[in-house]
Image (spheres, grey):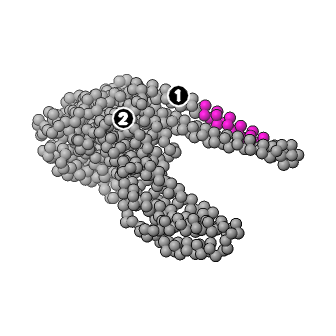
């Protein structure tokens, strides 16, 4: 069933209020059932005294309050689960409303483990960390989902793959019921299974047991139980039971190393399997139309059993492994060859299904990443899916472009075209006028476009571009690098990218600001000219008006634009509108005076 496709804010508020009412009702039910259980326990205690002391009632009457107590305990457990489920749903929609109301930064999954200062644009464009693009987009609950989504944001996808992903995102965007179901699956935790560890475990060389070992272990276990029971009943003497137990210990000694190896390896795979299985089950039973989503479902079908049921079997084996630590099983385990039978069962599962498990988790991760993009599409109905330009000169042409991480209500839209008429835009302007924000808006929307997501623009047409940025460059005491050295190393990295298969979209903020004006002008002009000659397109910002003269050096390849400001009643105001030409004023003096400096 598809969710109501109306305005997301109204839909989220409606569902939040519904779950809030359910939470209140479940909490009330939980308290009432708890009180009834206490009352029944008190009645049971009185009846025990009446039956054991004055003998006023028959003992069998105790079965009635006992049965009622058990029934109430079951109802109480169910009420607790429903209460927790309602609370989780309430949090889910509160988080969604936070994203709509710009209260999301710091409350979600920020993907910090994927952050790298060496990546050619991730740190500059705020891909990971508090208030990042990853935190806005991600609704994943598994490590594989995180990894897939991070990979899509860090590397542009191929055109054919992207078209299929856009189709899948469009289909899932209105399906709020499915996203709600997935958010409520299992415990309120994230699954952190390491896909590589599972892949190594599933494809490791087989631990070989003799072909008759499982049957022999079962026969010996049954013989141990039978002879032991007959010994206690006085039917048999000690020696039959002792003989069978002796054979058991011989088998335990023979298989010790193999059993220890199997059980030690499987323990690392177990803790988060339940959530993965729930996700598999939910994906398997949904009817999809998009080819990409159907492909994910097909990857979960192996033979006569689907992935979820196969994973459920492994889960049961792991639960049996965990039970081996119980003192009773440690005492009587050798009688029934408990650890040995479990080890052979686990190894049998691994030989049959182990090579598929990493692929299943990868499919779940891909689905979660698509769901994250679909959630973004649903929550940002004013955004549009980009038009992917066919083969031809590189281009980035946007109408109504906005910064995806800024509140839409406070974000000023601009039209930006790079590549059709000019390969380079030189944007001048005073401090805080919006130059860096424009760079990030271009970069982040390019990243979203080639990840398969909608973009913060009325329209965006672009080629497959390799984004590269030098915006947030800092020095490094640990590596002994100055800011200038860090910047030119990044520029070297960007230049090297122009030798790759995709055109480069370069975004350079205050290029070479760490050196003197003379060297800066010569170096910046040569660098930008070299990038353009290698087929790259891009944008350079500056408040140094001398760099605006690069337009004359690059002739038809470049165009000047600017942001300006005005002083109103002693206060600097910005309109954040991109205008053609070079800026004619600077606000540096006014800013210094605004903070109380006498200049």
Q: Residue furthest right?
A: 54
**Circle 2 crowding by C-alpha within 10 Å: few under 14, some 14–19, many from 20:** many
Viewer-proximal residue among 355 and 523: 355
Q: Are marks 2 and 1 in contact (CB under 8 Å)?
A: no
Residue occupying image coordinates x 68% and y 43%? 70
Q: Which residue is mark 1?
A: 17
- Residue 517: horizontal and vertical position, in percent? 22, 45
Residue occupying image coordinates x 48% and y 65%? 214
Question: Above or below — where is 364 with respect to 98?
Answer: below
The region drawn magenta spans 25-43
Picture disc at residue 27: none
Tag 2 secondary structure: helix
**In what quadrant of the picture does the C terminus appear?**
top left
Q: Is residue 338 left or right of residue 174?
A: right
Decide whether residue 40 is among the magenta residues.
yes
Residue occupying image coordinates x 67% and y 74%? 237
Q: Which residue is mark 2?
A: 172
Q: Of tags 2 and 1, which is closer to the observer?
A: 2
Name the chief secondary structure element in magenta. Answer: helix
- Could you say which quadrant of the image residue 579 lies in? top left
- Residue 556: horizontal and vertical position, in percent? 11, 35
**In what quadrant of the picture does the N terminus appear?**
top left
Question: Above or below — where is 555 with respect to 357?
Answer: above
- Residue 540: horizontal and vertical position, in percent? 23, 40
Tag 1 secondary structure: helix
Q: Is residue 413 visible?
A: yes
Q: Is residue 331 left or right of residue 252?
A: right
Ranked by sequence position, the earlier of labels 2 and 1 is 1
Q: Is residue 102 visible?
A: no
Decide whether residue 79 is among the magenta residues.
no
Residue occupying image coordinates x 14% and y 43%? 535
Spatial CA distance of label 2 from label 1 is 24 Å
């Amino acid at each position: 069933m598809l969710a109501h496709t109306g305005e997301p804010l109204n839909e989220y508020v409606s569902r939040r209020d519904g779950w809030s009412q359910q939470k209140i009702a479940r909490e009330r039910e939980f308290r009432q059932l708890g009180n009834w259980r206490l009352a029944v326990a008190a009645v049971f205690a009185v009846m025990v005294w009446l039956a054991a002391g004055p003998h006023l009632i028959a003992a069998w009457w105790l079965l009635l309050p006992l049965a009622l107590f058990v029934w109430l305990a079951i109802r109480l457990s169910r009420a607790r689960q429903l209460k927790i489920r309602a609370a989780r749903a309430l949090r889910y929609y509160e988080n969604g409303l936070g994203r709509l109301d710009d209260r999301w930064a710091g409350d979600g999954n920020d993907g910090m483990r994927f952050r790298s200062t060496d990546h050619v644009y991730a740190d500059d464009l705020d891909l990971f960390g508090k208030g990042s693009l990853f935190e806005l987009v991600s609704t994943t609950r598994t490590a594989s989902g995180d990894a897939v989504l991070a990979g899509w944001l860090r590397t542009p996808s191929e055109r054919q793959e992207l078209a299929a992903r856009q189709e899948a995102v469009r289909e899932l965007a209105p399906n709020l019921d499915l996203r709600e179901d997935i958010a409520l699956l299992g415990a309120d935790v994230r699954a952190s299974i390491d896909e590589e560890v599972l892949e190594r475990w599933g494809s490791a060389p087989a631990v070989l047991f003799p072909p008759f070992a499982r049957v022999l272990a079962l026969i010996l276990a049954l013989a141990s139980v039978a002879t032991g029971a007959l010994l206690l009943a006085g039917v048999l003497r000690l020696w039959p039971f002792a003989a069978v137990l002796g054979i058991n210990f011989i088998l335990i000694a023979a298989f010790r190393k193999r059993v220890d190896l199997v059980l030690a390896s499987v323990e690392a795979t177990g803790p988060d399997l339940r959530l993965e299985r729930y996700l598999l089950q939910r994906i398997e039973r949904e009817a999809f139309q998009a080819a990409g989503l159907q492909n994910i479902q097909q990857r979960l079908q192996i033979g006569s059993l689907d992935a979820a049921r196969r994973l459920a079997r492994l889960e049961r084996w792991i639960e049996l492994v965990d039970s081996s630590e119980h003192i009773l099983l440690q005492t009587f385990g050798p009688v029934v060859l408990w650890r040995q039978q479990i080890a052979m069962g686990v190894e049998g599962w691994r030989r049959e299904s182990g090579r598929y498990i990493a692929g299943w988790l990868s499919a779940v991760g891909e689905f979660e990443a698509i769901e994250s993009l679909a959630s973004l599409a649903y929550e940002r109905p004013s955004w549009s899916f980009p038009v992917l330009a066919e083969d031809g000169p590189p281009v980035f042409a946007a109408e109504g472009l906005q910064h995806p991480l800024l509140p839409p209500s406070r974000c000023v839209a601009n039209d930006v075209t790079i590549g059709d008429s000019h390969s380079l835009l030189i944007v001048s302007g005073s401090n805080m006028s919006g130059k860096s924000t424009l760079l990030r808006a271009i970069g982040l929307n390019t990243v979203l476009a080639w990840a398969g997501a909608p973009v913060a623009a009325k329209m965006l047409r672009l080629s497959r571009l390799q984004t590269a940025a030098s915006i947030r460059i800092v020095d490094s005491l640990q590596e002994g690098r100055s800011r200038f050295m860090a910047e030119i190393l990044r520029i070297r990295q960007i230049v090297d990218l122009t030798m790759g298969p995709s055109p480069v979209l370069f975004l350079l903020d205050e290029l070479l600001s760490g050196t003197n004006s003379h060297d800066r002008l010569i170096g910046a002009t040569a660098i930008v000219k070299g990038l353009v000659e290698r087929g790259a397109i891009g944008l350079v910002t500056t408040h140094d008006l001398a760099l605006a003269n690069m337009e004359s050096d690059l002739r038809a390849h470049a165009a000047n634009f600017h942001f300006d400001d005005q002083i109103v009643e002693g206060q600097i105001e910005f309109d954040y509108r991109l205008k053609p030409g070079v800026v004619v004023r600077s606000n540096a003096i006014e800013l210094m005076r605004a903070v109380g400096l006498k200049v």
